[in-house]
Amino acid sequence: MRLTDFDIYKDLLKEKSGLVITQDKAYLLESRLTPVATKWDFASLDLLTAHLRGVPDPKLINDIVEAMTTNETSFFRDMRPFDTFRDVVMPFLLKERMHERKFRIWCAAASSGQEPYSIAMLLKNQESQFARWTIDIVGTDISHDILAAAKKGLYSQFEVQRGLPVQMLVQYFKQEGDRWQISDDIKKMIEYKYFNLLDSMASMGQNDVIFCRNVLIYFDESDKRDILNRMAKQLKPDGFLFLGGAETVIGITDEFAPIPDLRGVYARKDSPHLEKKANTQNQALA
């Protein structure tokens, strides 16, 4: 692909989604966008590219962004964050939200639904403790197609074999031909909706827990900082932010800090979760 053509896609993706694509990933453009060219009746990717120099249909732009969005995910991906959620966060919410008996979880970049469904299954396993609680789990993504798949909750044998414990497969799924349908009890726990992390987050309300895992790695540092700074305003002071294993807030924003002894979990700078860290530092200086 010519550099001038590559730049058209690079700039378009950066503007519309924040996705940063480098020259060494040009091959992805050809492999993922050729089907888009075919769908829109362009005989070649070159003709699609030429069309983008004019005033393209917004639906075409959306198809390009969706084709280039990475949707790699699995049930209980990297397991440790889910262990932390079950063993630390859930007991904390059970105690600290006992008075209002409600909390809200936002899964940003929810992809095809495995992450929010994993969270829902953990909560369902403890439903006796959360009886008569209001628990809102919201899954958002920039891809309309992937959100439609998440809402269906229908997965291949390969997808359910990736990280999903057998007992949960038996308990919460029903086999339909060569695919597995998640139960309505779990599906109804999740609200899925379209959301672009570059947009205002005011509509996302106040959250007790935010999962934003394995998505910030696709943004440049300026956009990462902006997203995290705005996300801090949507997280309650004693809330929890989960990032991916290759992601961090360190050196990017001062609005969050790592929670001591909880790898990959962060809190607002004014959070009581950070008092342990401050007290430890004060004792060391004494």
Image (cartoon, grey):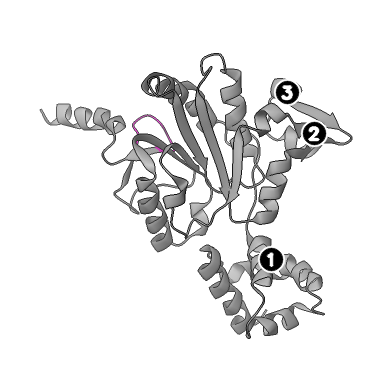
The magenta segment is 258-265
Asked if residue 47 is positioned above or below residue 196 in the image, the reply reads below
Near mark 2 (Cα within 10 A), the count class, few <14, some 14-19 or many ≥20, is some
| Residue 1 covered by magenta stretch | no
Residue 180's tag is 2
User: Outermost residue toward the right?
Assistant: 177
Q: Main secondary structure of the magenta part?
A: loop
Gap in angstroms between the C-alphas marked 2 and 1? 27 Å
Dot placed on the residue nearer the N-terminal end, 3 or 2: 3
Task: Tell me, yes or no, if residue 155 can be seen here.
Answer: yes
Q: Earlier in the sequence, mark 3 or mark 1?
A: 1
Query: What is the spatial separation of the Cα atoms under label 3 and label 2, in whole angstroms?
Result: 13 Å
Q: Residue at x 65, y 41 (%)?
A: 113
Disc 3 to disc 2: CB gap under 8 Å: no
User: Which of the pair 14/140 is nearer the observer?
Assistant: 140
Q: Nearer the viewer, mark 3 or mark 1?
A: 1
The circle drawn on residue 63 is 1
The stretch drawn in magenta includes residue 259: yes
Mark 2 or 1, nearer chain start: 1
- Would you identify the image quadrant in which residue 92 lies? top left
Query: Whole-Å distance between the Cαs marked 3 and 1?
Result: 36 Å
Residue pointed to by mark 3: 166
Amino acid at circle 1: Asp
Q: Secondary structure at mark 2?
A: strand
Dot 1 alpha-carbon crowd within 10 angstroms: few under 14, some 14 to 19, many 20 or more:
some
Q: Tell me the element at label 1.
A: helix
